[in-house]
């Protein structure tokens, strides 16, 4: 038997545990019924744990994930009882930065015409992928506050962009385009306002583009990108952008594919797919939905697909995507996407169908 693949599960906060419970059942199905040698390692990390004993992201866990795991599946982090989000940042950024997962890959793909909210547009018009830089930018936490609480207070967050960091993310976007036969890559920035940081992005983009002559390289300002995505998303295939813009644009993108309950993501060190990856739905912990069996688990189902592709089973990603599309068509889904099932019942349907196909 092949060596087991260690998969760490971090359900986290709010609706995280509910959607990851369904995702876990799928992984168990692959382990128990389809012979995948998966070792599932569930971690008790999140707001409850933090409030209980102060633990956020222990060093031993970080080391085992870095040294032994093939993948991490994360639900969501964020809890109103921890308004400063310190546990969420330690865990989420501990994974993204700590494992150098520089490409946050967020497909924006509508799986049914019914999910597309744009007038006159259909699912075929919404099929792109955003490559979000995931280890730099405004997220590095450099900066500080001065004279806090006074009338003279100053608050600074530095936006860090390195040649290496920008170039490798842009290259990941072009490589993806090349291997998927895509014809174009768009780079979204604000080089008109951010003349230092985004001039680097602009220059670097067109330099890297020269290595991919078969792919058209387009520059677009990120504000205009938001406009175009709503007017007509069909020309977009691959979008590369910085950390902050990628975060924002992919919530907009999620709206085009049926909402946050449908948006999956992968965090990878794209140059070396053998390295551990982290997989998470794009949505957060949705506190108002938590504990009510209302959360849509399909983003997590699609995320499991991305995870399975990463660990060597790309056909299973396609199988899960087709099942999710069918769940939408047959209304075996939650209210946010037009059904009337609960989170767990959607999981039941997926598991049952998975047993048949
Ligand atoms: P959110 O993604 O939790 O919710 C935004 C909207 O989408 C809400 O209306 C919510 O009901 C809906 N929604 C989200 N997921 C859904 C699902 N699976 N099914 C149905 N509807 C769904 O974003 P928010 O409200 O801005 O943030 C809540 C908390 O989550 C905050 O603490 C935030 O920092 C955190 N957050 C964490 C992550 C992460 O862990 N990766 C991502 C985003 C936000
Ligand atoms: C996401 C989230 C996170 C981010 C938050 C929780 C820090 O919005 O994963 O999209 O901004 O990256
Ligand atoms: Mn976000």
Image (cartoon, rainbow, N blue to C red):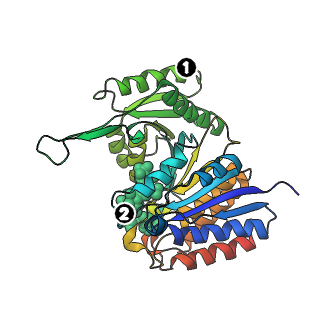
The disc at residue 210 is: 1
Q: Label 2 neighbourhood size at 10 Å, few (<14), some (14-19), many (20+)?
A: some
Q: Position of residue 149 (x, y in %)?
A: 17, 49
Question: Is residue 117 something one can see in this rendering?
Answer: no
Q: Nearer the viewer, residue 233 or 354?
A: 354
Residue appearing at x 39%, y 46% in the figure: 249
**Which residue ends up furthest to the front in the rendered image?**
53
Q: CA distance from mark 2 to mark 1?
A: 47 Å
Secondary element under disc 2, as helix, strand or loop, is: loop
In the displayed structure image, the side of residue 128 where residue 5 appears, left or right? right
Residue appearing at x 74%, y 73% in the figure: 355
Q: Position of residue 180 (x, y in %)?
A: 63, 40
Residue 103 figure quarter: top right
Vertical side of 353 occupied by 248: above or below: above
The disc at residue 82 is: 2
Vertical side of 47 occupied by 246: above or below: above
Q: Nearer the viewer, residue 60 or 46?
A: 60
Ligand 1 within 8 A of label 2's CB? no
Vertical side of 131 occupied by 203: above or below: above
In the displayed structure image, the side of residue 232 where residue 308 appears, left or right? right
Q: Quadrant of the N terminus?
A: bottom right
């Amino acid at each position: 038997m092949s060596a087991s693949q260690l998969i760490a599960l971090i359900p986290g906060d709010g609706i995280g545990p509910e959607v990851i419970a369904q995702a876990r059942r799928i992984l168990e199905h692959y382990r128990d019924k389809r012979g995948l040698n998966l070792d599932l390692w569930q971690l008790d990390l999140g707001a409850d744990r933090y409030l209980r004993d102060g633990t956020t992201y222990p060093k031993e866990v970080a080391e085992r994930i870095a040294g032994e795991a093939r993948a991490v599946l994360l639900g969501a982090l964020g809890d109103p009882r921890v308004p400063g989000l310190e546990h969420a940042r330690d865990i989420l950024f501990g994974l993204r930065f700590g494992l150098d997962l520089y490409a946050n890959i967020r497909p924006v793909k509508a799986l049914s015409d019914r999910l597309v909210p744009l007038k006159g547009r259909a699912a075929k018009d919404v099929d792109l992928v955003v490559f979000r830089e995931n280890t730099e930018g405004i997220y590095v936490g450099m900066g500080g506050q001065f004279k806090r609480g006074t009338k003279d207070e100053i608050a600074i967050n530095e936006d860090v962009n390195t040649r290496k960091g920008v170039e490798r993310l842009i290259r990941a976007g072009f490589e993806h385009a090349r291997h998927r036969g895509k014809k174009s890559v768009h780079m979204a920035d604000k080089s008109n306002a951010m003349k230092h940081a985004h001039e680097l992005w602009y220059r670097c983009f067109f330099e890297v583009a020269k290595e991919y002559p078969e792919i058209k390289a387009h520059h677009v300002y990120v504000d205009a990108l938001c406009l175009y995505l709503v007017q007509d998303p069909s020309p977009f295939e691959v979008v590369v952008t910085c950390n902050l813009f990628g975060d924002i644009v992919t919530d907009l993108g999620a709206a085009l594919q049926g909402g946050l309950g449908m948006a999956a993501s992968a965090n990878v060190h794209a140059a070396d797919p053998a390295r551990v990856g982290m997989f998470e739905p794009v949505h957060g912990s949705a506190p108002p939905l938590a504990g009510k069996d209302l959360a849509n688990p399909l983003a997590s189902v699609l995320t499991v697909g991305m995870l399975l592709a990463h660990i060597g089973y790309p056909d299973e990603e396609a199988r899960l995507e087709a099942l999710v599309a069918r769940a939408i068509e047959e209304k075996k889904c939650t209210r946010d996407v037009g059904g009337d099932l609960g989170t767990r019942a959607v999981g039941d349907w997926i598991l049952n169908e998975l047993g048949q196909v």
